[in-house]
Amino acid sequence: MEAIKNKKEVLLSVRDLEVTFGSKRNPFKAVKGVNFDIYKGETFGLVGESGSGKTTIGRAIMRIHPTSDGTITYKGERINGKISPELDKRVISEIQMIFQDPFGSLDPRQKAFSIIKEVLVEANTYHGTEEVKRKVNELLVKVGLSEEMGERYPHEMSGGQRQRLGIARALACDPKIIICDEPVSALDVSIQAQIINLFKELQREMGLTYIFVAHDLAVVRHIADVIAVMYLGRIMEMMEAVELYKNPLHPYSQALLSAIPIVDYYEEQKRERILLKGEVPSPIHAPSGCPFHPRCPYASDQCRKVPPELKNVGNGHYVACYYVEEKLN
Ligand code: SF4
């Protein structure tokens, strides 16, 4: 696949990825033929409603969900399917995940200090009580918590503080990629901005690469460099984030963007909202052809029969839509 921009080093590549769920008799594909590259130090936004496959892709990269076809390559080595124990160990520490609800992934019986310490002891990269203690306190401060906070249990912290603790725990592994799965969706808007700023600061300081999974385009707007818009297991549109907000081409992306409120009152009054008919169908009963066709105002017979390919329409702007192809030709 042609790079979105001729730049930097590709850290992670996904090619023709498929993830299948369900039983042997009734299988269904949650991810279908997905391709993308992620560059070092960049934030890749994966956006879509429930059932779009965005979280499944994150979990396939983490090796939580097995893949049924395609390849995931990290630093040039294939990491899906059967891999060596050494590579598995490296992937586990270098690719970390942060969850929407850190409560569910933090041991409620342990204090913050012990939660981070456990990761450091397991990784065996810091030795001796003093060295480990210094590193835990450094991580607490790095994510905006104080050393004193180390004495608190997760239930004694606010939602934002717990998310900071989840980030500190992920950083303890010295990761290269962090998959952020809706990390701010459960937080108040003011706290969301603080956590997004923390992600950006850490990226600048540590050269981290993020995969940022979100259900709406408003959240990723402030952090993503590249965005892939997903619908029922397929990428519908993918491009540099600035380009998407300026010039969305796919009817689904246009509808998603039109739902984001604009701060300027007069601009907000002027702009047109695109209301989509119906709901996202279940991935178990995904429509034939273009999965978006039952809700698309431009759907043709061709759309109902054959899914459109994701094509580069110029400057690394990829779109899967017959209507857009026709309009641009
Ligand atoms: Fe709509 Fe057809 Fe484009 Fe799908 S391919 S988004 S149904 S016009």
Image (spheres, rainbow, N blue to C red):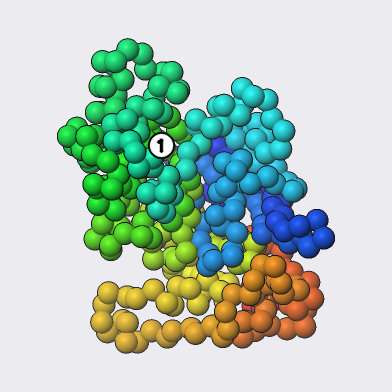
In this view, the residue in front, 271 or 140, is 140
Most distant residue in the right direction = 25
In front: 312, or 305? 305
113 on left or right of 103: left
Residue at 73% across, 61% down:
28
In the rendered image, the vertical position of residue 323 relative to residue 197, given as above or below: below
Task: Identify the image quadrant of the C terminus.
Answer: bottom right
Q: Is residue 71 left or right of residue 248?
A: right
Left of 48 or right of it: where is 151? left
Image position of 130 with respect to 163: above or below: above
Residue 288 image point, x, y percent = 76, 73
Taking the spot 48% from the left edge, 73% from the top edge, the residue there is: 256
Q: Give coordinates of residue 169: x percent, y percent.
A: 37, 36
Please identify the quarter of the rendering in which residue 53 is found.
bottom right
Could you tell me the amino acid type at mark 1? Answer: Ala
Q: Could you tell me residue 64's position as x and y percent?
A: 60, 43
Rate crowding at label 1 as few (under 14), some (14 to 19) or many (20 or more) other CA atoms within 10 Å. many
**Side of 74 where 215 appears, left or right:** left
Q: Residue furthest top?
A: 128
What residue is shown at x 24% (from left), y 28% (from top)?
A: 137
**Residue that appears at 74% across and 48% down:** 68
Judge whether residue 212 can be spotted in this image: no
Look at the numbered disc 1 and say if its residue's Cβ is closer than 8 Å to ligand 1. no
x then y, percent, for residue 78: 67, 34
Q: Is residue 118 above or below residue 107?
A: above
Q: Secondary structure at mark 1?
A: helix
The number of discs equals 1
Q: Nearer the viewer, residue 113 or 155?
A: 155
Q: Which residue is mark 1?
A: 170
